[in-house]
Amino acid sequence: MSLLSVKNITMAFGSVTAVDDVSFELHAGQLLALLGPNGAGKSTCFNVINGQLRPARGSVRFDGHEIAGIRPRDIWRLGVGRTFQVSATFGSMTVLENVQMALLSFGKRLFRFWAPAAGFYRREALALLERVGMAGEAGRLCGTLSYGDVKRVELAMALANRPKLLLMDEPTAGMAPAERHAMMAMTKRLVREDGLAVLFTEHSMDIVFEFADRMIVLARGKLIAEGDSATIRNDEAVRAAYFGRLAQPCMSAGTGTPSNVPLESL
Ligand SMILES: Nc1ncnc2c1ncn2[C@@H]1O[C@H](COP(=O)(O)OP(=O)(O)OP(=O)(O)O)[C@@H](O)[C@H]1O
């Protein structure tokens, strides 16, 4: 059975239908890429799933619960985590303290009265940092880390909630090529080892084709294709609506780095 089942969701802003009757499924232990050109509706889809937007129509079922329209915090509590494009860490706190804060935030709901005695989850925080390859940097201030290392800490923080589903918004944006590769390899390991489900947006097609188990493609709010990399590469609708634009590689918003590589070169 699917962990996440999105059925016929529609979301409009005035006259713009940002997401138009979109349905897809995601299973535990899968890495699913949500693709589409700028303005296709990817962020809107994310925001519907994490509760920031209530869809006009449709259903979002997660782990046996209908979550469309319920509060983001309640969705988070059910096990939907999220990483953001903008940094969510405190630069003046250490790597360890940032992760301890995330654990405290989660722990409060389970051990509200025990939290002060919990040693601020030092051991648990170190274990999470170990998983993302950052235990050796535990004592450093987050503000002194490289961009790629901040992203690793953010991943550890997102894992503190023990999510079953992680939404990752352009996890490799702004990273150097080697960092991008390492980040996605680590994410894939978590997916395989923990049975985590990951839904991610990504403008770098080389990353998507290398790491995603499956991909879905939106164009002007509609889901136009779904499948593995071979299916997506050869899909005429995708080439026309999305990859056709790659003949002139565009720049990824905010990063100033080339966001796409031509389909022909993959
Ligand atoms: N809060 C809003 N108010 C009005 N229009 C919005 C709002 N959010 C999104 N839109 C519109 O909905 C459409 C889909 O936007 P969305 O941000 O979901 O696309 P996207 O695929 O995430 O784009 P990008 O890759 O550029 O982030 C766009 O036409 C956008 O202008």
Image: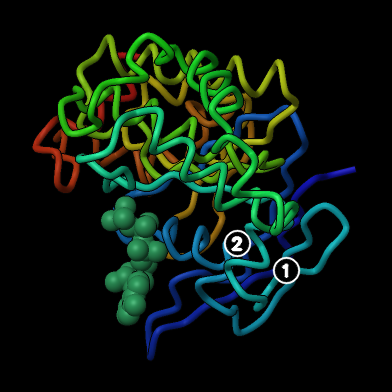
Ligand 1's quadrant? bottom left
Residue at figure coordinates x 62%, y 24% from the top left: 213
Farthest-out residue, front = 117
Residue at figure coordinates x 69%, y 17% from the top left: 192
Residue 255 rendering spot, x and y as whole percentages: 14, 39
Which quadrant holds residue 144? top left
Residue 247 rendering spot, x and y as whole percentages: 19, 32
Q: Would residue 67 appear left or right of 241 to someone viewing this image?
A: right
The 10 Å Cα crowd at callout 2, few under 14, some 14 to 19, many 20 or more, is: many
Circles 1 and 2: CB atoms closer than 8 Å:
yes
Q: Which dot marks residue 49?
A: 2
Q: Earlier in the sequence, mark 1 or mark 2?
A: 2
Which quadrant holds residue 204? top left
Q: From the image, tell me which residue sits under label 1.
A: 67
Which quadrant is the N terminus positioned in?
A: top right
Q: Which dot marks residue 153?
A: none
Residue 7 rendering spot, x and y as whole percentages: 74, 64
* Viewer can see residue 237: no
Q: Measured along the vertical axis of the image, is residue 203 above or below residue 221? A: above
Q: CA distance from mark 1 to mark 2?
A: 8 Å
Q: Would residue 111 appear left or right of 217 to someone viewing this image?
A: right
User: Could you tell me the amino acid type at mark 2?
Assistant: Ile
Residue at figure coordinates x 23%, y 29% from the top left: 141
User: Could you tell me the amino acid type at mark 1?
Assistant: Ile
Along the line of sight, which residue is nearer the eye, 8 or 129?
129
